[in-house]
Amino acid sequence: MNTLDQKTAIITGGNSGIGYATAKLFKSKGANVIITGRNAGAVNDAASELGVTGYISDQGDILAIDKLAEVVKADFGTIDIIFLNAGIANFAPFEQSSEGHFDEIININVKGVFFTLQKLLPLLNNGGSVIFNTSVNASVGMPNSGVYSASKAALIALSRVLATELSSRKIRVNCISPGPVETPVYEKLGLNAEEIAGFSKVLSDKILLKRFGQSQEIAQLAAFLGSDDSSFITGTEMVIDGGLIVNPVV
């Protein structure tokens, strides 16, 4: 069913994981899709595979964000959906968290997201949809995730302010907070296959449904929030975690 027909959507970090799955689903539902990412090869490959438009853009670089907004305006004019999906996940115990660790996560996950939306907002049509990809980590108190959890909690707080500020334009602003999802992020943390399997087993035992989520499952929720089917939903955080939040890891 083409519930996104005639809509133009931009998905940051759309070259892998949840972003890739969402771009694929949006495309199948009739949307004109734009993906972004900072790895040129990955973005170009994903755009070619999906049949969507890909732009190289580093969310940690304000000048790159400005350029992205200029290119989107020149090529598409306006957009209908902004899925702020790009982000990084690095973990360290509180007492061992360095200034560099803090700055990297906050720069990309908070500052980068903030200004990406600010620069793209003039292009968003009235009645459009803004979706933040946050995390259940903002609520569960997972050890070693202090800065990452804070970055996602900041986005949830921001989304509620923006839901109020943008209500006059009928723009809906919502958050998706996934639990553990099978994506390449665990490999990026430097874990080997055995470590990933052990980590997955510990977490899966805490999830009521006894498994990790799939990127496609998060994409389904993003497609709902981007469509007119969610026309009376704004200022909300939707948790999609298989029940982890009611059986936390701590």
Image: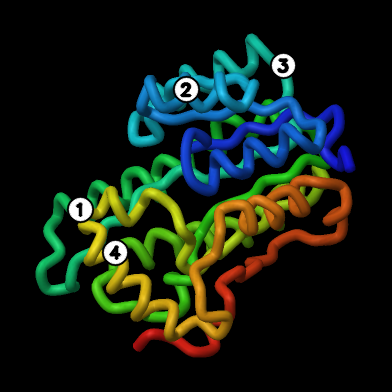
What whole-number distance in Å separates the C-alpha atoms at marks 1 and 3?
A: 40 Å
Report crowding for label 3: few under 14, some 14 to 19, many 20 or more residues within 10 A (C-alpha): few
Left or right: where does residue 114 sit relative to residue 2? Answer: left
What whole-number distance in Å separates the C-alpha atoms at marks 4 and 2?
A: 26 Å
- Vertically, is 234 above or below 77? below
**Numbered badge on residue 9:** none
Q: Quadrant of the N terminus?
A: top right
- Give the structural element (helix, strand or loop) at label 1: loop
Of labels 1 and 4, the one closer to you: 4
Q: Which residue is mark 4?
A: 196
Report crowding for label 1: few under 14, some 14 to 19, many 20 or more residues within 10 A (C-alpha): few
Q: Which residue is mark 1?
A: 190
Q: Position of residue 139 (x, y in %)?
A: 47, 77
- Vertically, is 88 above or below 77? below
Q: Quadrant of the C terminus?
A: bottom left
Left or right: where does residue 53 sit relative to residue 170? Answer: left
Q: Earlier in the sequence, mark 1 or mark 3?
A: 3
**Numbered badge on residue 77:** 3
Q: Earlier in the sequence, mark 1 or mark 4?
A: 1
